[in-house]
C-alpha cells in the first residue's frame, strides 16, 4: 500500500488531531482515515453543543 498523498504539514496536523502516530497515519487506508475524521468532527460538534 502506498502512503497517503498529503503534505507533511497536513500529516502532522491530522496526527495531532486524531491522536495517532505520524507513521500510522501515513499508512492508514483512506476509508479508515475518513471514518476517523468524521468521528473527530462529531466529537467536536457535541462539545460545542454542550456549552
Image (cartoon, rainbow, N blue to C red):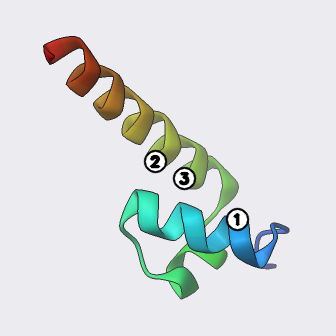
From the viewer's perspective, is 20 left or right of 50?
A: right
Separation (CA) of disc 1 from disc 3? 17 Å
- Front tag of 3 and 2: 2
Tell me where residue 34 sits by quadrant.
top right
Query: As displayed, is residue 13 above or below residue 50?
Result: below
At horizontal 46% and vertical 47% (from top left) the residue drawn is: 36
Report which residue position mark 3 lands on: 32
The residue lying furthest to the bottom in this view is: 23
Q: Is residue 27 visible?
A: no
Label located before the other in sequence (2 or 1): 1
Counting from the top left corner in percent of width and height, residue 12 is at 59, 74
Residues at circles 3 and 2 in contact by the CB criterion of under 8 Å:
yes
Q: Quadrant of the N terminus?
A: bottom right
At horizontal 81% and vertical 79% (from top left) the residue drawn is: 2
Report which residue position mark 1 lands on: 10
Residue 22 numbered tag: none
At horizontal 42% and vertical 59% (from top left) the residue drawn is: 18
The residue lying furthest to the top in this view is: 49
Q: Residues within 10 Å of mark 2 (few under 14, many from 20)?
A: some
Q: Which residue occupies the foreground of this view, 42 or 4?
A: 42
Separation (CA) of disc 2 from disc 1? 15 Å
Q: Residues within 10 Å of mark 3 (few under 14, many from 20)?
A: few
Q: Circle 2 sits in a helix, a strand or a loop, which is it?
A: helix
Report which residue position mark 2 lands on: 36
Tell me where residue 10 sits by quadrant.
bottom right
Tell me where residue 19 sits by quadrant.
bottom left
Q: Circle 1 sits in a helix, a strand or a loop, which is it?
A: helix
Query: As displayed, is residue 3 above or below residue 51?
Result: below
Counting from the top left corner in percent of width and height, residue 7 is at 81, 71
At horizontal 85% and vertical 68% (from top left) the residue drawn is: 5
Label located before the other in sequence (1 or 3): 1
The residue lying furthest to the front in this view is: 51
Amino acid at each position: 500500500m502506498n502512503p497517503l498523498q498529503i503534505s507533511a504539514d497536513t500529516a502532522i496536523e491530522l496526527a495531532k488531531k486524531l491522536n495517532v502516530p505520524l507513521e500510522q497515519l501515513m499508512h492508514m487506508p483512506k476509508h479508515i482515515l475518513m471514518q476517523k475524521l468524521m468521528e473527530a468532527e462529531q466529537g467536536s460538534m457535541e462539545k460545542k453543543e454542550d456549552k
